[in-house]
Amino acid sequence: MSLFSVKHLSVNIGAGKPVDDVSFEIALGETFALLGESGCGKSMTALALMRLLPMAARIAGGSVEFGGRNLLALTEAEMRNVRGGGVGFIFQEPSTSLNPVMTIGRQIEEALFLHRGLAGLAARKRAKELLESVGMPDAERRLDAYPFQLSGGQKQRAMIAQALAADPKLLIADEPTTALDVTIQAQVLDLLKDLQRQRGMGLLLITHDLGVVERMADHVGVMYAGQLVEVASREQFFANPAHPYSRKLFAALPERTGRGKRLSTIPGTVPPLTAVHAGCRFAARCGAVMAHCHTIVPEWYAQPGGQQVRCHLFDPAASNAGRTPHGASAVVPEAVPDAESQRAANEKPLLQVRDLKIHFPIRKGLLQRTVGHVPAVDGISFELSAGRTLALVGESGCGKTTTGKAILQLIRPTSGSVKLGGTELIGLQGAGLQPLRAQAQMVFQDPFASLNPRMRVSEIIAEGMQALGLKEDAQRRIAELMEQVGLRADMAQRYPHEFSGGQRQRIAIARALAVRPKLLICDEPTSALDVSVQAQIVNLLRDLQRELGLAYLFITHNMAVVDYLADDVAVMLKGKIVEQGSADAIMNHPRHDYTKALLSAAFNRAD
Amino acid sequence: MLTYLLRRFLYAIPILIGVNLITFVLFFVVNTPDDMARMQLGVKHVTAEAIEKWKVERGYDKPLLWNAQASGTSKATDTIFFEKSLSMFVLDFGRADDGRDIMNEIKTRMVPSLAIALPVFVLGLWSAVTFALLLVFFRATWLDFTGVVLCVMMMSVSSLFYIIGGQWLISKLWHLVPISGLGAGLDATRFLILPVIISVIGGLGSSVRWYRTLFLEECNRDYVRTARAKGLSELAVLFRHVLKNAMIPILTGVVVVIPSLFLGSLLIESFFGIPGLGSYTIDAIAAQDFAVVRAMVFIGSVLYIVGLWLTDLSYTLVDPRIRLQ
Amino acid sequence: MKFVLLWSDALFFLLVAMCVFGAWRARRNPQLASAWRQVGTHRVGVAAATILLCFAAIAVLDSVHYRERLPGENGNVQYSVEVLSVLDGLMTKERTQLEKTYSAPLATQLFAKESRADGEGRDFPRLKYGGAQLADPALRDADVEKRALGGLVAGFVIWVALAFCVRRWLRPRAPWFAWNAFVFTLAAIAVVSGVIVALVPEYHVFGTDKVGQDVLYLSLKSVRTALLIGTLTTLSMLPAALFLGIVAGWRGGWVDDAIQYVYTVLNSIPGVLLIAAAVLMMQVVIDGHPAWFSTSAERADARLLSLCVIMGVTSWTGLCRLLRAETLKLRELEFVQAAQAFGVSGFNIMLRHILPNVMHIVMISLVMDFSGLVLAEAVLSYVGIGVDPTTISFGTMINAARMELAREPMVWWSLASAFSFMFVLVLAANLFADAVSEAFDPRGKRS
């Protein structure tokens, strides 16, 4: 018997249907993963289940059965007993999801009082036990800590403790690890799994990460544009993803493609939540699209073994029925010549960094005198040759972004040496730096913050050329660049807000390329993008490297992209490089514990 | 944290010096004492002797910054700047045109001013927060909508109208409370009740609307969603979570005016004939008593700076993020 | 006739020109255009804007000044010392036909009893101009009704014509615009002004004040003062606030410290007291140099402008602080760093990247401050540190009328008229400000 069953759930926002006819079931002790890219309606689904939707959204129909009752028919007061009592909820962003001015202990005790009637010392004792059970170190003391005093991982543990306060039968976890560092992610996922086993809870896990699904789920539901398009057990799903969208998702992942191969991409982007659809929602981006896909919403078709797919390809009545749809053949990665074979390791390095140190002063006392330094980057050295890619890997706060900015002299290094093409950059000022600025450029992380919203794309691209005084036909060059990064030349007259995240990142790349740099510093250029779009950008970067012989300093925390793109890898931890070497060596034979932890967290490998 | 507060406290010194310089420039450099004398004595029929006499009476007959005729340290001290500006740091404001000591006057007039300003402050804050919470609780309903419309209308009415209208309606038409003046002891409440109510109502529109925005902003935060997911009722969410967080900007925003409550309110006091500092200032402005205006400017700035410092202090008290770092 | 361009006129027309230029710029820039378009779809915003435009039209009429040519003898040309505006010219009758003292709205008799000319007791004498065409004051009600009805019908007819034009030509060109709100506001304006215009020739529609001046005329004259103070105050210190705010946020370090110091010092002096002190001093300066001004209008104008500047000095700090905070935020954004990576100079970054991205704050604070300033003018003028006593403004009207509330029966019309005009103006400004800030505030839009 299922613990939790959702039938035909729909949510309306105006005319749009961000959640449309979603049905699934979760049994006790089972994990159901809701998989999809951002904006596909999976968080909205979770909120609808608990009737916590934002004002504008409204549940349009369906039922949510939990413990024999339809949650959608309960009164608000009854529903409050279910929330936190029968169903615990964990949110994505632990740093904003906890009340900043209440101690952790008080927040847990609040739930205990509400659902267990515990107060005073008894509540405190139970809260401490809960914190211990989620592996919070020094639980007694943490009870009186405020959220800002905890690390990201600890905050998420506190969230989990709070959600478990009333021993819920079902836990809904909305992207519980997305905001955390890779190594912490693994710990939190393990914790969730252990807790689930101990307590025999059902777990509804909402995620965009196939790795998380593989690690955690018993059953998988793939969501696209507000609809479930495929429901399967984990084994079936990973062995044979059926829906074209599921297949594309797998193909777009660098870790499943293999080095040197071109990533398969899904053209276009996820439609907005408010869009109104006629036929199959994936039709516009599908490789195997048929004429009636655009007009008729597909039914559910069962496959052998219980796998369910919502796609016309699987319609047994149709003539072209088949296990391997026609479009799937496009998924097979196309082999491209290995970049490494084209270029032997260059003799003279383009970028030489020696013992680079960047210390930020700590000011204290009445007169704000500098009493010490935070070593953000603490004596790192590396080299990068033309046409090669060096990945600088590490978690947030390890100093990798600071390093990138220091190389461009956006942050003044404290000491050390940065040589670009043999010229020392440190100590150069103003005009002296100008000629070197054309040689090294940067692509930033957030495509929404990296383009000035008040400037036309053509002005954005031309800015660097003007500032560096390049004598060129600007209009011709802009058109050329736009095409180089896969955009139409006439789009240059538009403003950034008219472009999607992936397109903006293309514009940012075009801007950097405008001054014909030899070195491109890419600061997490894909981390803000969806998997399918990430693949487009990674492919673009590879193509450009081959075409222009660019050197990349690729700053990232994503080991999968590193594995796919990098020639050399440097692993950073707390301002220092702890391991450095060729990508093959590091990926296959990591020596440092931290590298091993990163890899095992990213690839689900056993140590 | 203590060093932080001490540092903020020390920061007040250069600001006070700045204020002092501005008042000095405004009152003695932009216009010479001769100009002031001519203005006060009437532009047309003024004689040089009359001006000289006016200046000597007030001690404005000295050089501005440097007294070359004096000897020793009095070269610097026997000047207008030293006697009229620097002396304000030790709260020596000299005498008003009617010959009374300004500091004494300020001390006695502070009490009635505070007797109005304090209840206005407390009642105003309380009622604004209450109404704002009410609107937020009923957000996106007709009650909320009507409330916001009412707030905008109340904001659009001149404060003079509240005073004149209120005074006329209650005192004259209904003969409920005396129209102006101030009694002694408990009797004073009879006189204070109307000005307090009018001031509270006059300020209500804009503050309710402002607090409502703050509360609504807070309602959209992630932690509020967490609190709801925990099973808390809407009321509990509002009072235990939203109010607590929104009070940080509200409290720290109002703390800065607390010291300035001593100054009273210019309009209310002069309309209701309450002998506080506000009416004192108004009278001084009308009589063009420069010494009093200068003293009030300086005192007002001191109180504001104390308010700024209290704001820093209150931040460290209400916000654990600042207290514990 | 000789045209006179007062300083405030020049600034006011500059402001109008800036609005026109801004509108032209906004048409070419799709983002600005879409923000304004959003204001245009906002029904309340459009209604408020319509009313504000009406007030602005009155102010424009009142800002074209001239001196009349006097019938000079033997050819030498002389001009009157009195500076008049087009509005004065249009309302010559209301301006010059002074009654003896108070009279109620639409009254035919004075408010106070006077000894009769024939010496037999005291009576309410007939007004010299108000309702003078009537043989018998008892006929007044019927006459007023007739005229008002005529005005109503005329106003309605004009409105129907206008509404037709809107429907026929304007609506198809911009179907997204909230034309209904515009048309219905026009209806209210047309009907009200129709009635007033019909009554004005024979009556004092809003009564007369102590010296017998027509209250309607005074109220209309006050509109210009209010608009000037509401706009010029913010504009007068806008360049300084923009420059200092952006530079403080961008440069940081000691520049930031110095600028923060300046505005904290200015901010720490209570606004009213600083204004009082500065206005007193300004008064001394103006009185001390009578030679600077050739007419009393110029003198009053100088005082008005100095009041704007003084109020600007006390209020620019808030805007400066906002701009500094926003610049601090923008400085860390990646597009600014991208520009730095190209070696774009600090000045160019401030000009091209920071300035356009803080303009919405300037826009919002401009419209938000307006209503507060209009209200502040009344209070300041009432306290005696506002505009020149000869300048007609809401504050001076209230100041002149407030003592009369104690009279039995009460003289209420001056106050009522000033407060109503002010209320409509400020309410419209508040509603318009809400619509504008909703459209320009990026917080509401990004999702």
Image (tube, coloured by chain):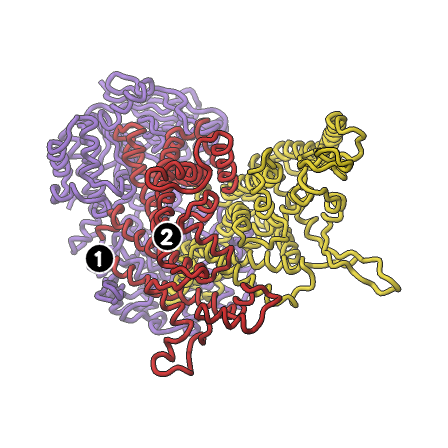
Chain colours: A purple, B red, C yellow
Residue C444 position by quadrant:
top left
Q: Residues within 10 Å of mark 1 (few under 14, many from 20)?
A: few
User: Which chain letter goes with mark 2?
Assistant: A
Residue C175 position by quadrant:
top right
Marks 2 and 1 sit apart, C-alpha to C-alpha, by 39 Å
Query: What amino acid type is highlighted by mark number 2?
Result: Gln
Whether residue C155 is visible to the viewer of this picture, yes or no, is yes
Give the answer, above or below, for where C172 lies relative to C338: above
**Camera-side residue: C1 or B283?**
B283
Give x and y (percent) for residue B145: 47, 30
- Give the numbered dot on residue A445: 2
User: Which chain letter goes with mark 1?
Assistant: B
Q: Residues within 10 Å of mark 2 (few under 14, many from 20)?
A: many
Q: Which mark is in front, 2 or 1?
A: 1
Give x and y (percent) for residue A381: 25, 66
Contact between marks 2 and 1 (CB within 8 A): the answer is no
- Give the numbered dot on residue B188: none
Question: Which residue in the protein does label 1 denote?
Answer: B2
Q: Quadrant of the N terminus of chain A?
A: top left
Q: The residue tagged with tag 1: helix, strand or loop?
A: helix
Give the answer, above or below, for where B140 lies relative to C266: above
Query: Left of C366 or right of it: where is A316?
Result: left
Q: Residue at x 40, y 67 (%)?
A: B85
Q: Residue at x 51, y 42 (%)?
A: B160
**Camera-side residue: A527 or B72?**
B72
